[in-house]
Image (spheres, helix red, strand yellow):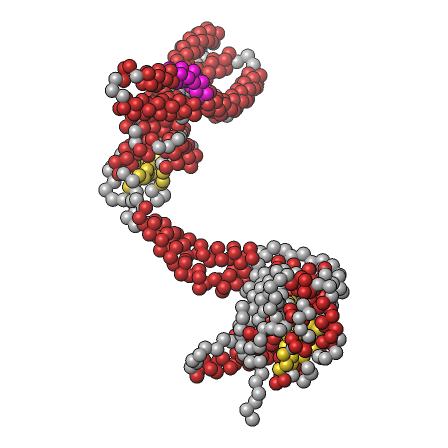
Amino acid sequence: MAETTNHGKDSRALTTTSPLPFRKVPQRGAPRTSTEPQQAFTLWTVLNALRQWWKVAVPIGLLLATIAGTIVYVLFEPKYEAAAWIQIHYRAPYLAFEPESSRDGLDRFVRTEMALIRSPLVLGPVVTQSAISQLPEIREQEDPIEWLSQRIAIRPVEKSELFKISFSSDVPEIAQQVVNAVADAYFELRNQDMAGRVHRVVQLLDEERASRFREVERLQEDVRELTKQAMKDRPYADMTDSGFLVRHPLSGLQDRLVTEEVELQVLEARIKALKESKSATTVPSEVVEQSIQEDRAVQSLTEQILVIRAELYETERRVANTGQDRRCTKLKDDIKQLEWSLEQYRNELRPKIKGAAEATRARKREDDIAQLQVTAESRRIILDQLQKRYQGEIEKLKESNSGDGDLDVEFKKQELVRAEDVHQRISGRIIALRTEQRAPDRVMLLKKADLPKKPVRVFPAKEIALAVLVGLCLPFLLAVAWERSVNRISDMEYLERHLNLNVIGEIARLPTRSIVLEPSQVKRFKGDLRLFEESIDTLRTSLVLSDELKNMKVLAVTSAVNNEGKTSVAAQLAVSIARATGELTLLVDGDIRSPDIHKIFEIPLEPGLAQFLGHECTLDEALVPDKNRKMHLLPAGRFKGSPHKLFGNGAVKLLLDQVSSRYHFIIIDTPPVLAASEALVVTKAADAALICVMRDVSRVDQVRKAYNRLLATGSHPVGTVLSGITARRYVDRYGTYSFSDG
């Protein structure tokens, strides 16, 4: 036999490693209790998939990347962005008096205004405008308000008080039209609501000022009466000095009373104005109509009317006298009936939608009122405490100055001073509110959107880059997913870890020799061949010297499925044993379905094993001696029937009994276990079975099934051998040890 030949579909060579310690081999029939977890996406899984598939994945990835990038470029439509500029002041602008609202934080105020711009209160009237509702981008949407809310962008310009309300579209005119419509609706809603409330607050404070003025007049009269009475009782007393309480600590307490009283009056006016505000709960008709249009029943009836109208149009085109055609009349009646039903349903739906929207606004107004009432209640508590403290101090002064009539006059004067102060401060608030009504608003429209001249982006660089990246990565991702699903065996450690099987060794890949080789290629070929022969010899040494297999005479070489290198291992192992031991060795081709041994050794196919088992020839007639290698060959023979008829009834056992006395070692090349069940008969009759595994070909689940079947049928699997190892990887793992030239 030529040791470097590699013929047949299953003649890939296996390479063995240096002898490895055997694990304890399970007894015949012993159940195997090992579970196999599903392979995870590890770095090694990815690298192994890339190693196997990169030659296919790279060209496919480049093709997909080119196609994806081209599609993105062809489908890309430049976007035009229109923007309106607004200014949101950190503090509310004022002419003479800083309003209380200017102390509010900017963040909360800005978030509120942004939410208002995107709310149905603003966008509802926008999408119902005839010019906007007919735009293709708006008309195609099931929920135009929600779609527009997501597409409208509100961005600050750097860290300034300037903001941009922008909208992008394929058509520059549409972008400009939408942005300006949104800005107009927003400022109209904001100005109407704020102006109405401020005007009502001014009216209420005017009423309070009139009431306070009457109170001042009453106190002035009381002071005059008390002064006259005191002068009658003490005609020579000086009643002009009223600075006693001014110098007393009560003066500071009185100032605080005035401040709290005025602030409470302003809060109560704001609460009352908000309660009376109709605009706070009024829902614009445009919003109601838009909600009706979005109702599913309304849309369904509208679609039915459109379908029937289209059918009527086609019918009228085909009929000469449409007035007398029954079909046309029926369609017209159906349209009228549907239109009547639609109008009735809209009329029923309108108050429901309006009521729900008003209820929502009412809840919002109640929340605002509740917040103001909490603040007002806090003011009342503070004011009540200050008044009690003020009255207590007054009582103490009266007790310490009992009988002093001048003190009563002084108290009344201070009460008058306080009332006048409250009246003046309320008047000042009214003047401030009226003045600041003419002040610039806290939110101002600086510039409406112009017609955009240039698109935002001319070339979709990011989209193309993403498409190219996806196209490049997709084949590799599919390769990784495929490798994870098939779960191939890639190295010895993987085989041991996932199957818990004894790995006897690794076999280097048998090099393939071309017809013409360069000198450098000849040297490489010889080196790879030497590694292959060394790996086979290492496998033979491991088997012969193992204590577990010292009494082994018949070895069945099998595999889980086809193309896993069992024939090459069996043939090369038989040659190595015969050459090393000098004992007569027999190589049996037990794969009568797809024989290969006769091709490797270039001998006749028949007569062979099939003829011997079928009693068509004697054993000596079937055997082919190879005296140069101290071995005999038993080819498979030719058989067209069922292999089970030949291998049944103990025929294999009978054969082995006949040849055991003649040969020191018997190697049997069996069919794959999972594909041909007669392999189980052969392996059971042998002393031991060696499972061949091909790197990057064999699958974990198939090898596990084959091993379990061997155990279940009483065979004696001694371990596995991993073949197909590249020369470079073999050298990296085990090194080389050549003969010295000296």
**Residue 459 on image: x %, y %:** 30, 50
* Bounds of the magenta segment: 339-358
Report whether 541 appears left or right of 232: right
Query: Residue at left 53%, top 20%?
Result: 384
Q: Is residue 355 magenta?
A: yes
Q: Is residue 696 shown above or below 296?
A: below
**Residue 600 on image: x %, y %:** 56, 75
State the residue in front, 112 or 62: 62
State the residue in front, 374 or 342: 342
Position of the N terminus by quadrant = bottom right
Query: Residue at left 25%, top 17%?
Result: 321
**Residue 650 on image: x %, y %:** 74, 66
Residue 111 placement: quadrant = top left
**Residue 5 on image: x %, y %:** 53, 77
State the residue in front, 100 or 5: 5
State the residue in front, 712 or 284: 712
Q: Is residue 241 magenta?
A: no
Residue 616 placement: quadrant = bottom right
Position of the C terminus by quadrant = bottom right
